[in-house]
Image (cartoon, grey):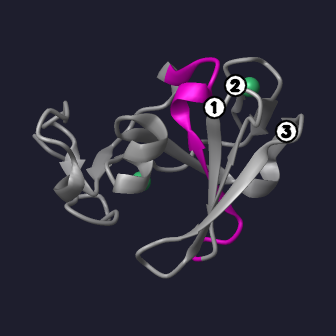
Amino acid sequence: MKSYSGACLCGEIRYEIKADAGPSRICWCKDCQRISSNGTVNVIFPSDAIRITGTPGKHEKTADSGNTVTRRFCSKCGSHFFSDSSGRPGLTVVRAGTLDAPSAIKPAMNIWVASAPTWACIDQSLDQSKGPPLPPSPAKT
Ligand SMILES: [Zn+2]
Ligand SMILES: [Zn+2]
C-alpha cells in the first residue's frame, strides 16, 4: 500500500493518505473551473484512508447530477483539497496539485471537456469524455 501527503498553500491544513491511488482524471466542469481557474486534476481515494490535520471549511452544492457535492478547503488561504459526492459514498476526490509529490499521480482521462474553454491544454493522448467519466477504453497503440 502506498502513502501520500499534502498541504494547503499556507500550511494550516495537512493530510496523509495510506492507500493505493484510485482513478485520476482532469475535470473541466464549470464548478472545477470556478474553484481552480482551470481544469482540476483529481485522484480518488477511500475516504477513511485520509487523515487530516486542521479543520477545513466546507461548501455544499447540488451538482447537475442531483447529487450533493461537499468541497473542503482551507478557510485561511482558500486552497481546495477534497470533494465528496452523495452519489459516491466512501470515496473522496483529492485535488492532485495539493499533494507534496503530485507526479506520483498519472491522470488517465479528461472529463466534461464539452465545457472546457477554447484555450484549454488537453493532452490528446489521454481518453476524453464530453461529460462524466466513462470506463477506460482499450489500450491505445
Ligand atoms: Zn491554508
Ligand atoms: Zn469538475
Of residues 137 and 71, the one drawn nearer to the viewer in this rendering: 71
Question: Which of the 4 quarters of the picture holds residue 78?
Answer: top right
Q: Earlier in the sequence, mark 2 or mark 1?
A: 2
Q: Amino acid at mark 2?
A: Cys
- Where does the image place residue 63, in percent across and percent down from the top left? 48, 71
Which stretch did the figure color magenta?
87-102
Q: Residue at x 67, y 57 (%)?
A: 59
Report the disc number at residue 79: 1
Q: Which badge, 3 or 1, comes first in the chain's sequence?
A: 3
Mark 1: amino acid? Ser
Q: Secondary structure at mark 2?
A: loop
Q: Position of residue 77 (x, y in %)?
A: 70, 26
Q: Residue at x 33, y 43 (%)?
A: 108
Rate crowding at label 2 as few (under 14), some (14 to 19) or many (20 or more) other CA atoms within 10 Å: many
- 88 falls in the magenta region: yes
Q: Is mark 1 within 8 Å of ligand 1?
A: yes
Disc ID at residue 46: none
The residue where tag 2 is placed is: 8
Q: Closer to us: mark 3 or mark 1?
A: 1
Relative to residue 86, is residue 97 drawn left or right?
Answer: left
Q: Mark 2 against mark 3, which lies toward the viewer? A: 2
Is the C-beta of the residue carrying label 2 under 8 Å from the nearest atom of ligand 1?
yes
Secondary structure, mark 3, is strand
Q: Relative to residue 125, is residue 45 drawn left or right? A: right
Q: Residues within 10 Å of mark 3 (few under 14, many from 20)?
A: some
Three-letter amino acid code at disc 3?
Answer: Ile
Do callouts 2 and 1 mark residues in contact (Cβ within 8 Å)?
A: yes
Is 134 in the magenta? Answer: no
Q: CA distance from mark 2 to mark 1?
A: 5 Å
Which residue lies at the image location 18% right of the left edge and 43% below the top edge? 117
Residue at 14% over, 44% down: 140
